Image (cartoon, rainbow, N blue to C red):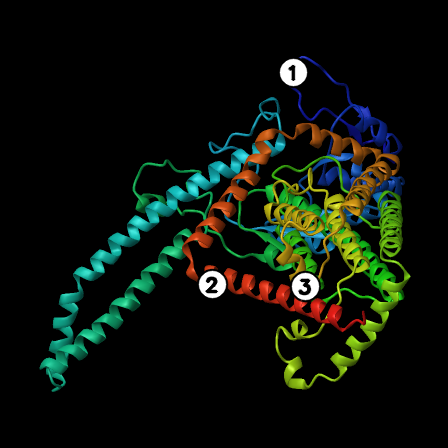
Amino acid sequence: DDGHLEWVPAITTGAEKLEPQPFDASKMESLREKHDLVITGHGLELAMQSPSAAKVKEQLSCCQVMARLSPFQKEQIINAVRKGEKAFTMMCGDGGNDVGALKEADVGLALLSGFGNANVGGGDGQLAKPEDVMDAEDALAEQRKENAMRMQEVSKKAKEEMERKRRDLMSKQQQWIEEELQARRERGEDVGVWGQMAAMKTVAFRLNQEVQKEHQLMQKKHGNAFAAGAAKSAAGDIDAMMADELPMVQLGDASTAAPFTTRTPSIGACVDIIRQGRCTLLSAVQQMEIMMLESMIAAYTMSTMSVDGTRPSEAQMMASGSLVSVASIAFSFARPVERMHPVRPLASVFHPAILFSMLGQLLIHLGCMVYIAGLAKEVMGEDALKEIIEFEKEREKHIANMDEEAMSEWNWFRSVPFKTNMLNTCCWLVETSQQVSVIFVNYKGRPWMKGMLENQPLFLSVFLSVIMVAVCAWGVLPWFNELINLEVIPEGLRMQVMTTLMVSLIGSFCWDRLMVAIFAPHIWQVMKDEARATKMSDFIPILQTCGYVAVGGVFLLLGNPLLWGLAYYMYRNYKKGQESQAQAAAQAAAAKPA
Protein backbone atom coordinates (compact mmCIF):
# COMPACT_ATOMS: atom_id res chain seq x y z
CA ASP A 1 0.00 0.00 0.00
CA ASP A 2 1.30 3.50 -0.91
CA GLY A 3 -0.67 5.20 1.82
CA HIS A 4 2.28 5.92 4.08
CA LEU A 5 4.30 7.54 1.24
CA GLU A 6 3.82 11.20 0.46
CA TRP A 7 5.58 14.15 -1.13
CA VAL A 8 6.66 16.76 1.43
CA PRO A 9 8.46 20.11 0.93
CA ALA A 10 12.24 19.61 0.97
CA ILE A 11 12.79 23.28 1.93
CA THR A 12 10.55 24.49 4.73
CA THR A 13 11.78 28.08 4.85
CA GLY A 14 10.31 30.89 2.82
CA ALA A 15 7.00 32.68 2.48
CA GLU A 16 5.29 29.99 0.40
CA LYS A 17 3.98 27.06 2.42
CA LEU A 18 3.38 23.78 0.56
CA GLU A 19 1.16 21.03 1.85
CA PRO A 20 2.22 17.37 1.64
CA GLN A 21 0.70 15.40 -1.25
CA PRO A 22 -0.04 11.67 -1.39
CA PHE A 23 2.42 9.62 -3.38
CA ASP A 24 0.98 8.46 -6.71
CA ALA A 25 3.42 7.07 -9.29
CA SER A 26 1.06 7.85 -12.17
CA LYS A 27 1.06 11.58 -11.27
CA MET A 28 4.82 12.04 -11.06
CA GLU A 29 5.00 13.41 -14.61
CA SER A 30 2.43 16.15 -13.94
CA LEU A 31 3.94 16.90 -10.53
CA ARG A 32 7.37 17.42 -12.08
CA GLU A 33 6.02 20.29 -14.19
CA LYS A 34 5.37 22.30 -11.03
CA HIS A 35 8.09 21.12 -8.65
CA ASP A 36 11.58 19.65 -8.56
CA LEU A 37 11.17 16.14 -7.17
CA VAL A 38 13.60 14.74 -4.59
CA ILE A 39 13.64 11.12 -3.43
CA THR A 40 15.82 9.44 -0.80
CA GLY A 41 17.10 5.91 -0.70
CA HIS A 42 14.64 4.89 2.02
CA GLY A 43 11.70 6.37 0.13
CA LEU A 44 12.81 4.64 -3.07
CA GLU A 45 13.04 1.32 -1.25
CA LEU A 46 9.44 1.66 0.03
CA ALA A 47 8.22 2.72 -3.42
CA MET A 48 9.87 -0.27 -5.04
CA GLN A 49 8.09 -2.59 -2.58
CA SER A 50 4.68 -1.11 -3.36
CA PRO A 51 2.20 -2.58 -5.90
CA SER A 52 3.00 0.29 -8.28
CA ALA A 53 6.72 -0.55 -8.42
CA ALA A 54 6.61 -1.06 -12.20
CA LYS A 55 5.12 2.41 -12.68
CA VAL A 56 7.69 3.90 -10.33
CA LYS A 57 10.51 2.47 -12.46
CA GLU A 58 9.01 4.06 -15.56
CA GLN A 59 8.73 7.46 -13.85
CA LEU A 60 12.09 7.56 -12.06
CA SER A 61 13.46 10.01 -14.62
CA CYS A 62 10.95 12.57 -13.28
CA CYS A 63 13.04 12.93 -10.10
CA GLN A 64 15.67 15.66 -10.29
CA VAL A 65 17.52 14.73 -7.09
CA MET A 66 18.13 11.27 -5.63
CA ALA A 67 19.96 11.28 -2.31
CA ARG A 68 21.37 8.78 0.21
CA LEU A 69 21.21 5.82 -2.14
CA SER A 70 22.77 2.43 -1.64
CA PRO A 71 25.10 1.02 -4.32
CA PHE A 72 22.34 -1.36 -5.47
CA GLN A 73 19.83 1.48 -5.75
CA LYS A 74 22.20 3.53 -7.92
CA GLU A 75 22.54 0.61 -10.28
CA GLN A 76 18.78 0.04 -10.12
CA ILE A 77 18.07 3.66 -11.12
CA ILE A 78 20.48 3.46 -14.07
CA ASN A 79 18.71 0.37 -15.42
CA ALA A 80 15.24 1.80 -14.79
CA VAL A 81 15.93 5.10 -16.55
CA ARG A 82 17.61 3.41 -19.50
CA LYS A 83 14.73 0.98 -20.05
CA GLY A 84 11.89 3.37 -19.22
CA GLU A 85 13.10 6.34 -21.25
CA LYS A 86 14.95 4.38 -23.95
CA ALA A 87 17.78 6.79 -23.26
CA PHE A 88 21.52 6.60 -22.84
CA THR A 89 22.72 7.06 -19.28
CA MET A 90 25.78 8.70 -17.78
CA MET A 91 27.11 8.19 -14.26
CA CYS A 92 29.90 9.88 -12.34
CA GLY A 93 31.19 8.84 -8.95
CA ASP A 94 34.30 8.84 -6.78
CA GLY A 95 33.97 5.84 -4.46
CA GLY A 96 33.66 2.08 -4.30
CA ASN A 97 29.90 2.37 -3.74
CA ASP A 98 29.58 3.81 -7.27
CA VAL A 99 31.28 0.91 -9.06
CA GLY A 100 28.10 -0.97 -9.97
CA ALA A 101 26.38 2.09 -11.41
CA LEU A 102 29.53 3.15 -13.27
CA LYS A 103 29.74 -0.22 -14.96
CA GLU A 104 26.04 -0.35 -15.73
CA ALA A 105 25.81 3.13 -17.27
CA ASP A 106 26.47 3.69 -20.96
CA VAL A 107 29.11 6.27 -20.02
CA GLY A 108 30.96 6.07 -16.71
CA LEU A 109 33.11 8.88 -15.33
CA ALA A 110 35.27 8.40 -12.24
CA LEU A 111 36.23 11.36 -10.07
CA LEU A 112 39.52 10.78 -8.30
CA SER A 113 39.13 10.75 -4.54
CA GLY A 114 40.55 13.22 -2.08
CA PHE A 115 38.62 16.41 -2.76
CA GLY A 116 36.06 16.37 0.02
CA ASN A 117 33.10 18.63 -0.78
CA ALA A 118 34.66 20.25 -3.84
CA ASN A 119 31.60 19.39 -5.92
CA VAL A 120 28.93 20.55 -3.49
CA GLY A 121 30.20 23.74 -1.96
CA GLY A 122 32.36 26.76 -2.41
CA GLY A 123 35.86 27.32 -1.21
CA ASP A 124 34.59 28.27 2.24
CA GLY A 125 32.60 25.05 2.57
CA GLN A 126 29.25 26.82 2.17
CA LEU A 127 26.70 25.65 -0.38
CA ALA A 128 26.05 27.98 -3.29
CA LYS A 129 22.65 29.64 -3.24
CA PRO A 130 20.46 28.87 -6.29
CA GLU A 131 19.72 32.55 -6.87
CA ASP A 132 23.48 33.24 -7.05
CA VAL A 133 24.01 30.72 -9.87
CA MET A 134 22.72 32.37 -13.04
CA ASP A 135 24.31 29.83 -15.37
CA ALA A 136 25.57 26.36 -14.44
CA GLU A 137 28.42 26.34 -16.96
CA ASP A 138 29.55 29.77 -15.78
CA ALA A 139 29.61 28.42 -12.24
CA LEU A 140 31.65 25.39 -13.33
CA ALA A 141 34.06 27.61 -15.24
CA GLU A 142 34.52 29.80 -12.18
CA GLN A 143 35.11 26.74 -10.03
CA ARG A 144 37.75 25.47 -12.46
CA LYS A 145 39.45 28.83 -12.40
CA GLU A 146 39.57 28.80 -8.61
CA ASN A 147 40.88 25.22 -8.55
CA ALA A 148 43.57 26.09 -11.09
CA MET A 149 44.69 29.03 -8.99
CA ARG A 150 44.83 26.84 -5.88
CA MET A 151 46.82 24.19 -7.68
CA GLN A 152 49.24 26.80 -8.99
CA GLU A 153 49.60 28.15 -5.48
CA VAL A 154 50.33 24.77 -3.94
CA SER A 155 52.64 23.80 -6.81
CA LYS A 156 54.64 26.95 -6.21
CA LYS A 157 55.00 26.16 -2.52
CA ALA A 158 55.93 22.57 -3.31
CA LYS A 159 58.56 23.74 -5.78
CA GLU A 160 60.02 26.14 -3.24
CA GLU A 161 60.18 23.38 -0.64
CA MET A 162 61.82 21.02 -3.13
CA GLU A 163 64.44 23.63 -3.97
CA ARG A 164 65.13 24.16 -0.27
CA LYS A 165 65.61 20.46 0.29
CA ARG A 166 67.80 20.21 -2.80
CA ARG A 167 70.04 22.99 -1.42
CA ASP A 168 70.23 21.18 1.92
CA LEU A 169 71.33 18.01 0.19
CA MET A 170 73.92 19.88 -1.88
CA SER A 171 75.36 21.42 1.27
CA LYS A 172 75.97 17.91 2.61
CA GLN A 173 77.89 16.85 -0.47
CA GLN A 174 81.35 17.76 0.94
CA GLN A 175 80.57 15.95 4.20
CA TRP A 176 79.52 12.84 2.27
CA ILE A 177 82.77 12.93 0.26
CA GLU A 178 84.85 13.06 3.45
CA GLU A 179 82.80 10.21 4.93
CA GLU A 180 83.31 8.15 1.75
CA LEU A 181 87.09 8.81 1.79
CA GLN A 182 87.24 7.80 5.45
CA ALA A 183 85.37 4.63 4.65
CA ARG A 184 87.80 3.85 1.84
CA ARG A 185 90.75 4.36 4.22
CA GLU A 186 89.22 1.97 6.71
CA ARG A 187 88.77 -0.60 3.93
CA GLY A 188 92.37 -0.08 2.81
CA GLU A 189 91.42 1.28 -0.60
CA ASP A 190 93.14 4.03 -2.59
CA VAL A 191 92.37 7.59 -1.43
CA GLY A 192 94.56 9.37 -3.99
CA VAL A 193 93.38 11.18 -7.11
CA TRP A 194 91.59 8.13 -8.51
CA GLY A 195 90.21 7.32 -5.11
CA GLN A 196 88.81 10.83 -4.73
CA MET A 197 87.21 10.62 -8.18
CA ALA A 198 85.61 7.30 -7.25
CA ALA A 199 84.36 8.83 -3.98
CA MET A 200 82.88 11.79 -5.88
CA LYS A 201 81.12 9.38 -8.26
CA THR A 202 79.66 7.46 -5.33
CA VAL A 203 78.49 10.67 -3.65
CA ALA A 204 76.94 11.93 -6.89
CA PHE A 205 74.98 8.70 -7.15
CA ARG A 206 73.89 9.02 -3.52
CA LEU A 207 72.86 12.64 -4.09
CA ASN A 208 70.75 11.63 -7.07
CA GLN A 209 69.08 8.90 -5.04
CA GLU A 210 68.31 11.30 -2.20
CA VAL A 211 66.82 13.87 -4.60
CA GLN A 212 64.61 11.22 -6.20
CA LYS A 213 63.50 10.04 -2.76
CA GLU A 214 62.53 13.58 -1.76
CA HIS A 215 60.73 14.02 -5.07
CA GLN A 216 58.69 10.86 -4.46
CA LEU A 217 57.82 12.05 -0.96
CA MET A 218 56.63 15.36 -2.37
CA GLN A 219 54.53 13.53 -4.94
CA LYS A 220 52.91 11.46 -2.22
CA LYS A 221 52.17 14.56 -0.21
CA HIS A 222 50.87 16.67 -3.09
CA GLY A 223 49.86 14.33 -5.87
CA ASN A 224 47.68 16.33 -8.27
CA ALA A 225 45.69 18.00 -5.52
CA PHE A 226 43.79 20.75 -7.29
CA ALA A 227 41.77 21.32 -4.15
CA ALA A 228 44.80 21.26 -1.90
CA GLY A 229 44.53 24.91 -0.99
CA ALA A 230 40.75 24.89 -0.68
CA ALA A 231 40.67 24.44 3.08
CA LYS A 232 43.85 26.38 3.78
CA SER A 233 44.87 29.97 3.46
CA ALA A 234 47.19 31.00 0.69
CA ALA A 235 49.58 32.27 3.30
CA GLY A 236 51.36 30.04 5.77
CA ASP A 237 54.04 27.45 5.75
CA ILE A 238 53.62 24.36 3.61
CA ASP A 239 54.70 22.14 6.47
CA ALA A 240 51.71 23.37 8.46
CA MET A 241 49.48 22.48 5.55
CA MET A 242 51.02 19.01 5.39
CA ALA A 243 50.52 18.53 9.09
CA ASP A 244 46.74 18.72 8.63
CA GLU A 245 46.74 15.92 6.06
CA LEU A 246 46.59 17.71 2.76
CA PRO A 247 44.12 16.02 0.34
CA MET A 248 45.78 13.70 -2.16
CA VAL A 249 44.73 12.31 -5.52
CA GLN A 250 44.65 8.54 -5.32
CA LEU A 251 43.36 5.95 -7.75
CA GLY A 252 40.35 4.18 -6.25
CA ASP A 253 37.77 1.58 -7.16
CA ALA A 254 35.77 4.08 -9.20
CA SER A 255 38.64 4.77 -11.60
CA THR A 256 39.11 1.05 -12.32
CA ALA A 257 35.41 0.57 -13.10
CA ALA A 258 34.82 3.57 -15.38
CA PRO A 259 36.07 4.08 -18.95
CA PHE A 260 36.70 7.78 -18.21
CA THR A 261 38.61 9.25 -15.29
CA THR A 262 39.03 12.96 -14.58
CA ARG A 263 41.78 14.52 -12.51
CA THR A 264 39.76 17.63 -11.81
CA PRO A 265 37.64 17.79 -8.65
CA SER A 266 34.52 18.78 -10.56
CA ILE A 267 31.54 17.12 -12.17
CA GLY A 268 32.10 19.63 -14.96
CA ALA A 269 33.99 16.82 -16.71
CA CYS A 270 30.55 15.37 -17.57
CA VAL A 271 29.86 18.47 -19.63
CA ASP A 272 33.31 18.15 -21.24
CA ILE A 273 32.60 14.58 -22.33
CA ILE A 274 29.28 15.58 -23.88
CA ARG A 275 30.84 18.56 -25.69
CA GLN A 276 33.70 16.48 -27.06
CA GLY A 277 31.35 13.63 -27.94
CA ARG A 278 29.13 15.96 -29.94
CA CYS A 279 32.15 17.37 -31.74
CA THR A 280 33.38 13.86 -32.60
CA LEU A 281 29.92 12.77 -33.75
CA LEU A 282 29.41 15.82 -35.94
CA SER A 283 32.90 15.55 -37.43
CA ALA A 284 32.37 11.85 -38.27
CA VAL A 285 28.97 12.45 -39.89
CA GLN A 286 30.30 15.34 -41.98
CA GLN A 287 33.34 13.38 -43.10
CA MET A 288 31.05 10.57 -44.24
CA GLU A 289 28.97 13.07 -46.23
CA ILE A 290 32.04 14.59 -47.86
CA MET A 291 33.63 11.22 -48.60
CA MET A 292 30.49 9.87 -50.33
CA LEU A 293 29.92 13.02 -52.41
CA GLU A 294 33.55 13.37 -53.49
CA SER A 295 33.76 9.68 -54.41
CA MET A 296 30.68 9.96 -56.63
CA ILE A 297 31.93 13.17 -58.26
CA ALA A 298 35.38 11.69 -58.94
CA ALA A 299 33.88 8.47 -60.33
CA TYR A 300 31.53 10.29 -62.70
CA THR A 301 34.26 12.71 -63.85
CA MET A 302 36.58 9.81 -64.62
CA SER A 303 33.87 7.99 -66.56
CA THR A 304 32.91 11.15 -68.48
CA MET A 305 36.47 11.68 -69.70
CA SER A 306 37.11 7.97 -70.31
CA VAL A 307 34.10 7.68 -72.63
CA ASP A 308 35.65 10.30 -74.90
CA GLY A 309 39.11 8.80 -74.72
CA THR A 310 40.80 11.29 -72.40
CA ARG A 311 41.81 11.17 -68.75
CA PRO A 312 43.24 13.44 -66.04
CA SER A 313 47.02 13.64 -66.00
CA GLU A 314 49.09 12.59 -63.02
CA ALA A 315 50.11 16.21 -62.40
CA GLN A 316 46.46 17.27 -62.29
CA MET A 317 45.54 14.56 -59.81
CA MET A 318 48.51 15.49 -57.62
CA ALA A 319 47.65 19.21 -57.69
CA SER A 320 43.97 18.82 -56.80
CA GLY A 321 44.53 15.87 -54.48
CA SER A 322 47.15 17.72 -52.42
CA LEU A 323 44.96 20.72 -51.61
CA VAL A 324 41.81 18.68 -51.08
CA SER A 325 43.75 16.28 -48.83
CA VAL A 326 44.96 19.19 -46.73
CA ALA A 327 41.36 20.34 -46.37
CA SER A 328 40.26 16.84 -45.38
CA ILE A 329 43.07 16.49 -42.85
CA ALA A 330 42.06 19.86 -41.41
CA PHE A 331 38.96 18.14 -40.05
CA SER A 332 41.26 16.73 -37.39
CA PHE A 333 41.66 20.30 -36.13
CA ALA A 334 37.96 20.39 -35.23
CA ARG A 335 37.60 21.33 -31.57
CA PRO A 336 34.49 21.51 -29.40
CA VAL A 337 33.17 24.91 -28.41
CA GLU A 338 33.55 26.16 -24.86
CA ARG A 339 29.83 26.00 -24.06
CA MET A 340 27.42 23.10 -24.47
CA HIS A 341 24.45 24.06 -26.65
CA PRO A 342 20.96 22.86 -25.61
CA VAL A 343 20.20 21.65 -29.16
CA ARG A 344 21.72 18.33 -30.19
CA PRO A 345 23.33 17.86 -33.63
CA LEU A 346 22.01 15.39 -36.21
CA ALA A 347 23.43 11.97 -35.37
CA SER A 348 23.12 9.97 -38.61
CA VAL A 349 23.73 10.37 -42.33
CA PHE A 350 20.37 8.69 -42.85
CA HIS A 351 18.49 11.57 -41.27
CA PRO A 352 16.20 13.00 -43.98
CA ALA A 353 17.87 16.41 -43.80
CA ILE A 354 21.28 14.89 -44.55
CA LEU A 355 20.18 12.11 -46.92
CA PHE A 356 18.09 14.32 -49.21
CA SER A 357 20.74 17.02 -49.04
CA MET A 358 23.39 14.62 -50.33
CA LEU A 359 21.14 13.36 -53.13
CA GLY A 360 20.30 16.91 -54.22
CA GLN A 361 23.92 18.06 -54.09
CA LEU A 362 24.97 15.03 -56.14
CA LEU A 363 22.38 15.80 -58.84
CA ILE A 364 23.44 19.47 -58.98
CA HIS A 365 27.13 18.58 -59.30
CA LEU A 366 26.52 15.90 -61.92
CA GLY A 367 24.23 18.21 -63.89
CA CYS A 368 26.95 20.88 -63.99
CA MET A 369 29.52 18.28 -65.05
CA VAL A 370 27.30 17.00 -67.89
CA TYR A 371 26.69 20.55 -69.09
CA ILE A 372 30.34 21.62 -69.05
CA ALA A 373 31.51 18.37 -70.68
CA GLY A 374 28.99 18.81 -73.52
CA LEU A 375 30.05 22.43 -73.94
CA ALA A 376 33.74 21.49 -74.11
CA LYS A 377 33.12 18.75 -76.68
CA GLU A 378 31.10 21.16 -78.79
CA VAL A 379 33.97 23.66 -78.79
CA MET A 380 36.56 20.98 -79.63
CA GLY A 381 34.68 19.28 -82.48
CA GLU A 382 34.63 15.65 -83.61
CA ASP A 383 38.05 15.69 -85.28
CA ALA A 384 39.81 16.85 -82.11
CA LEU A 385 38.04 14.17 -80.04
CA LYS A 386 39.14 11.43 -82.46
CA GLU A 387 42.69 12.78 -82.35
CA ILE A 388 42.68 12.57 -78.54
CA ILE A 389 41.48 8.96 -78.65
CA GLU A 390 44.31 7.96 -80.99
CA PHE A 391 46.84 9.85 -78.88
CA GLU A 392 45.71 8.13 -75.67
CA LYS A 393 46.16 4.72 -77.33
CA GLU A 394 49.74 5.57 -78.20
CA ARG A 395 50.31 6.97 -74.71
CA GLU A 396 49.16 3.74 -73.08
CA LYS A 397 51.55 1.77 -75.29
CA HIS A 398 54.39 4.11 -74.31
CA ILE A 399 53.69 3.60 -70.58
CA ALA A 400 53.46 -0.17 -71.02
CA ASN A 401 56.90 -0.26 -72.73
CA MET A 402 58.65 1.75 -69.99
CA ASP A 403 61.24 -0.26 -68.05
CA GLU A 404 61.18 -0.65 -64.27
CA GLU A 405 64.08 1.77 -63.71
CA ALA A 406 62.25 4.58 -65.50
CA MET A 407 59.06 3.90 -63.57
CA SER A 408 60.91 4.06 -60.23
CA GLU A 409 61.67 7.76 -60.65
CA TRP A 410 59.39 10.07 -58.63
CA ASN A 411 58.69 12.26 -61.66
CA TRP A 412 58.36 9.47 -64.24
CA PHE A 413 55.08 10.92 -65.50
CA ARG A 414 56.92 14.02 -66.73
CA SER A 415 58.62 11.87 -69.39
CA VAL A 416 55.29 10.54 -70.64
CA PRO A 417 53.63 12.72 -73.31
CA PHE A 418 50.21 14.16 -72.50
CA LYS A 419 47.99 15.99 -74.95
CA THR A 420 46.17 18.88 -73.35
CA ASN A 421 42.62 19.42 -74.50
CA MET A 422 39.60 21.50 -73.60
CA LEU A 423 37.50 18.57 -72.32
CA ASN A 424 40.16 17.53 -69.85
CA THR A 425 40.72 21.11 -68.69
CA CYS A 426 37.03 21.92 -68.15
CA CYS A 427 36.26 18.62 -66.40
CA TRP A 428 39.25 19.00 -64.08
CA LEU A 429 38.35 22.58 -63.15
CA VAL A 430 34.74 21.64 -62.45
CA GLU A 431 35.69 18.53 -60.46
CA THR A 432 38.18 20.42 -58.29
CA SER A 433 35.75 23.26 -57.61
CA GLN A 434 33.00 20.75 -56.75
CA GLN A 435 35.25 18.96 -54.28
CA VAL A 436 35.96 22.32 -52.65
CA SER A 437 32.26 23.23 -52.57
CA VAL A 438 31.42 19.87 -50.97
CA ILE A 439 33.73 20.69 -48.07
CA PHE A 440 32.50 24.26 -47.82
CA VAL A 441 28.80 23.35 -47.88
CA ASN A 442 28.88 20.33 -45.57
CA TYR A 443 31.19 21.66 -42.87
CA LYS A 444 28.85 22.94 -40.17
CA GLY A 445 30.73 23.90 -37.05
CA ARG A 446 28.99 26.05 -34.52
CA PRO A 447 27.35 25.72 -32.09
CA TRP A 448 28.87 22.25 -31.50
CA MET A 449 32.44 22.65 -32.75
CA LYS A 450 34.68 25.42 -34.03
CA GLY A 451 33.38 27.06 -37.19
CA MET A 452 35.22 27.35 -40.49
CA LEU A 453 36.57 30.80 -39.61
CA GLU A 454 38.06 29.33 -36.42
CA ASN A 455 39.45 26.24 -38.20
CA GLN A 456 42.15 28.16 -40.02
CA PRO A 457 43.86 25.20 -41.78
CA LEU A 458 40.53 24.20 -43.31
CA PHE A 459 39.56 27.74 -44.34
CA LEU A 460 42.95 28.52 -45.88
CA SER A 461 43.12 25.24 -47.81
CA VAL A 462 39.63 25.77 -49.23
CA PHE A 463 40.47 29.39 -50.07
CA LEU A 464 43.71 28.38 -51.83
CA SER A 465 41.85 25.72 -53.81
CA VAL A 466 39.39 28.34 -55.06
CA ILE A 467 42.27 30.66 -55.99
CA MET A 468 44.02 27.83 -57.85
CA VAL A 469 40.90 27.08 -59.92
CA ALA A 470 40.45 30.76 -60.82
CA VAL A 471 44.13 31.18 -61.73
CA CYS A 472 44.05 28.10 -63.98
CA ALA A 473 40.78 29.13 -65.65
CA TRP A 474 42.04 32.64 -66.46
CA GLY A 475 45.54 31.47 -67.40
CA VAL A 476 47.20 34.03 -65.11
CA LEU A 477 50.31 31.82 -64.81
CA PRO A 478 50.86 30.07 -68.16
CA TRP A 479 53.79 28.07 -66.82
CA PHE A 480 51.58 26.66 -64.04
CA ASN A 481 48.90 25.63 -66.56
CA GLU A 482 51.57 23.87 -68.58
CA LEU A 483 52.98 22.24 -65.46
CA ILE A 484 49.66 20.53 -64.70
CA ASN A 485 48.70 19.99 -68.37
CA LEU A 486 45.86 22.50 -68.64
CA GLU A 487 44.80 24.69 -71.53
CA VAL A 488 43.85 28.31 -71.04
CA ILE A 489 40.08 28.67 -71.27
CA PRO A 490 39.10 30.85 -74.29
CA GLU A 491 37.42 34.13 -73.43
CA GLY A 492 34.17 33.08 -75.08
CA LEU A 493 33.99 29.97 -72.92
CA ARG A 494 35.50 31.37 -69.73
CA MET A 495 32.41 33.06 -68.34
CA GLN A 496 30.29 29.98 -68.99
CA VAL A 497 32.77 27.80 -67.10
CA MET A 498 32.95 30.18 -64.15
CA THR A 499 29.15 30.53 -64.09
CA THR A 500 28.86 26.76 -63.98
CA LEU A 501 31.28 26.64 -61.05
CA MET A 502 29.27 29.25 -59.17
CA VAL A 503 25.99 27.42 -59.87
CA SER A 504 27.53 24.23 -58.54
CA LEU A 505 28.65 25.98 -55.34
CA ILE A 506 25.67 28.25 -54.65
CA GLY A 507 23.09 25.71 -55.80
CA SER A 508 24.40 22.96 -53.53
CA PHE A 509 24.65 25.41 -50.63
CA CYS A 510 21.05 26.59 -51.01
CA TRP A 511 19.74 23.04 -51.46
CA ASP A 512 21.52 21.82 -48.33
CA ARG A 513 20.17 24.65 -46.20
CA LEU A 514 16.67 24.13 -47.64
CA MET A 515 16.69 20.46 -46.62
CA VAL A 516 17.85 21.40 -43.12
CA ALA A 517 15.08 24.00 -42.85
CA ILE A 518 12.44 21.47 -43.96
CA PHE A 519 13.47 18.32 -42.11
CA ALA A 520 15.36 19.81 -39.12
CA PRO A 521 13.90 23.27 -38.38
CA HIS A 522 15.46 23.34 -34.90
CA ILE A 523 18.93 22.95 -36.46
CA TRP A 524 18.09 25.61 -39.05
CA GLN A 525 17.13 28.05 -36.32
CA VAL A 526 20.41 27.43 -34.51
CA MET A 527 22.38 27.95 -37.73
CA LYS A 528 20.61 31.27 -38.36
CA ASP A 529 21.34 32.41 -34.81
CA GLU A 530 25.02 31.58 -35.21
CA ALA A 531 25.16 33.39 -38.57
CA ARG A 532 23.66 36.51 -37.02
CA ALA A 533 26.20 36.35 -34.20
CA THR A 534 29.15 36.44 -36.64
CA LYS A 535 31.10 39.72 -36.39
CA MET A 536 33.75 41.36 -38.49
CA SER A 537 36.19 40.75 -35.66
CA ASP A 538 35.83 37.00 -36.32
CA PHE A 539 37.69 37.52 -39.61
CA ILE A 540 40.70 39.19 -37.97
CA PRO A 541 42.57 35.94 -37.04
CA ILE A 542 42.17 34.66 -40.61
CA LEU A 543 43.45 37.94 -42.06
CA GLN A 544 46.38 37.92 -39.64
CA THR A 545 47.31 34.39 -40.69
CA CYS A 546 47.09 35.32 -44.37
CA GLY A 547 49.32 38.32 -43.66
CA TYR A 548 51.89 36.15 -41.87
CA VAL A 549 51.92 33.67 -44.74
CA ALA A 550 52.29 36.44 -47.32
CA VAL A 551 55.11 38.15 -45.45
CA GLY A 552 56.85 34.83 -44.86
CA GLY A 553 56.51 33.92 -48.53
CA VAL A 554 57.95 37.25 -49.66
CA PHE A 555 60.81 36.92 -47.18
CA LEU A 556 61.66 33.44 -48.43
CA LEU A 557 61.37 34.41 -52.07
CA LEU A 558 63.54 37.50 -51.63
CA GLY A 559 66.03 36.07 -49.18
CA ASN A 560 66.54 32.43 -50.14
CA PRO A 561 68.91 31.77 -53.10
CA LEU A 562 67.65 28.19 -53.34
CA LEU A 563 64.16 29.44 -54.16
CA TRP A 564 65.64 31.84 -56.70
CA GLY A 565 67.41 28.94 -58.35
CA LEU A 566 64.26 26.82 -58.32
CA ALA A 567 62.23 29.63 -59.90
CA TYR A 568 64.90 30.13 -62.58
CA TYR A 569 65.02 26.38 -63.29
CA MET A 570 61.24 26.20 -63.74
CA TYR A 571 61.25 29.29 -65.97
CA ARG A 572 64.07 27.88 -68.14
CA ASN A 573 62.22 24.58 -68.59
CA TYR A 574 59.10 26.49 -69.53
CA LYS A 575 60.96 28.51 -72.19
CA LYS A 576 62.59 25.38 -73.60
CA GLY A 577 59.19 23.74 -73.86
CA GLN A 578 57.82 26.75 -75.71
CA GLU A 579 60.76 26.75 -78.14
CA SER A 580 60.48 23.02 -78.84
CA GLN A 581 56.77 23.39 -79.55
CA ALA A 582 57.44 26.29 -81.92
CA GLN A 583 60.10 24.26 -83.77
CA ALA A 584 57.81 21.25 -84.04
CA ALA A 585 55.04 23.44 -85.44
CA ALA A 586 57.45 25.02 -87.95
CA GLN A 587 58.71 21.61 -89.07
CA ALA A 588 55.16 20.34 -89.46
CA ALA A 589 54.25 23.39 -91.55
CA ALA A 590 57.34 22.95 -93.75
CA ALA A 591 56.59 19.25 -94.29
CA LYS A 592 53.11 19.93 -95.69
CA PRO A 593 53.00 19.95 -99.52
CA ALA A 594 52.44 23.34 -101.07
Residue in the image at 51% along x and 30% along y: 126
Q: Amino acid at mark 3?
A: Met
> Which residue is nearer to you in this view: 186 or 327?
327
Earlier sequence position, callout 3 versus callout 1: 1
Horizontal and vertical percent position of residue 390: 85, 73
Residue 75 appearing in the image: no
Q: Which structural element holds mark 2? A: helix
> Which residue is nearer to you in this view: 453 or 18?
453
Disc 1 residue crowd, few under 14, some 14–19, many 20+, Cα 10 Å: few
Q: Which residue is mark 1?
A: 14
Residues under numbered marks 3 and 1 in contact, where contact means CB atoms less than 8 Å apart: no
Residue in the image at 41% along x and 54% along y: 559
**Discs 2/3, front:** 2
Q: Amino acid at mark 1?
A: Gly
Residue in the image at 55% along x and 30% along y: 127
Q: Amino acid at mark 2?
A: Gly
Disc 2 residue crowd, few under 14, some 14–19, many 20+, Cα 10 Å: few
Could you tell whether 94 is left or right of 41 in the image? left
Q: Which residue is mark 3?
A: 318
Could you tell whether 487 is left or right of 145 in the image? right
Residue 400 appearing in the image: yes
Report the quarter where the N terminus lies: top right
Earlier sequence position, callout 2 versus callout 3: 3
Tag shown at residue 565 = 2
Horizontal and vertical percent position of residue 336: 64, 44
**Discs 2/1, front:** 2
> Which residue is nearer to you in this view: 103 or 243?
103
